[in-house]
Amino acid sequence: MTADSCHCRKGRQGERVEMSLIGSTARKKAFTLVELLLVFATIALLAAIAIPNFIRARSTARHDTELDKVRQIDGMKMQWALEHTNELDEFLAQAPWGKIAYQIPKSIQLDSNAVVLLKLSPRKTFEELSHFFDTNLPATFKVASVQFGKRMQASLISDPDTLKIIPLENEIQPVSYTSDTTWSWHISARQPGKYWLHLKLEILVTMDGKDLPYPIEAYQDFIVVEATKGQRVWRFVEAHWEWIASAVAIPVICLLARALYNRWKKWREKKEEENRPAIGFNVPQAEKEKKD
């Protein structure tokens, strides 16, 4: 063996050792699957904790902002009312009286809409107004006497994160002294629970030639509404029970018919074996004759 060949072999072995060292260091630097899964699980856990808190904080901040705006509006209204106390007293002393009736459902299903109805009449009695409502429904029905003006606004207010309210008519309407005025809303629940509804009826008065009317509260009420889970499956069964019964009954009848047929077939084969005549000797008797 020559010196050149030995030198070549040693060089190749050195290269292999160096490559193996580089591969081992590269393996040590890479992440394993378990480590990656732990990192992803940690990130998912932190996101599951942080995102609901962020959404809750944003909702709380928005709610506080809306409350501040309402307080500012109430303060401005109070200041305006103090400046025009005599004019408001004169208007309320001359404002006519009428009767209202309204109906609000006690419970709402999550997968359906409910209707809230309010009627104002300057001439009808409470009994005549009640004919426009179905008092047999599980709903809150109330009547009251209120003062009214030429323009009135009816509002139905709740937390927008829990109840969705859609007015079916314009909330600001002109009021007639001879005919009825109607307001109605569609309400739907976003999540189950018990929530407050604020019904407010206001007279819009324009004074000092201003375009912005001043609302005078004529009536308000707070009603509790319960949102419950819907019964989609039960309503689907009620609507399509013929198809469901057919889909269930046909396989059951086929299985019963097959089971009865198999039992009848076994019974028939058993009867045929019993009625079949014996041919030759049976096995035990043949064995006995061979032994003898």
Image (spheres, rainbow, N blue to C red):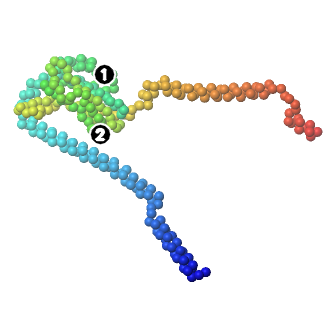
Q: Is residue 147 visible?
A: no
| Relative depth, front residue between 273 and 64 | 273
| Relative depth, front residue between 285 and 71 | 285
Viewer-nearest of discs 2 and 1: 2
- Identify the residue at image location x=83%, y=26%: 277
Q: Residue furthest right?
A: 292
Among numbered discs 2 and 1, the one appearing first in the sequence: 1
Q: Quadrant of residue 91?
A: top left
Residue underneath mark 1: 135
The percent position of residue 234, horizontal first and vertical second, equals 44, 29
Above or below 178: residue 59: below
- Identify the residue at image location x=49%, y=23%: 242
Neighbour class for label 2 at 10 Å: few (<14), some, many (≥20)? few
The percent position of residue 48, horizontal first and vertical second, equals 37, 50
Q: Quadrant of residue 117?
A: top left
Specify the amino acid type for callout 2: Asp
Neighbour class for label 1 at 10 Å: few (<14), some, many (≥20)? few
Q: Marks 2/1: CA distance? A: 30 Å
181 horizontally vs 136: left or right: left
Specify the amino acid type for callout 1: Thr
The percent position of residue 216, horizontal first and vertical second, equals 14, 31
Q: Secondary structure at mark 2?
A: loop
- Identify the residue at image location x=11%, y=25%: 95
Residue underneath mark 2: 161
Above or below 125: residue 168: below
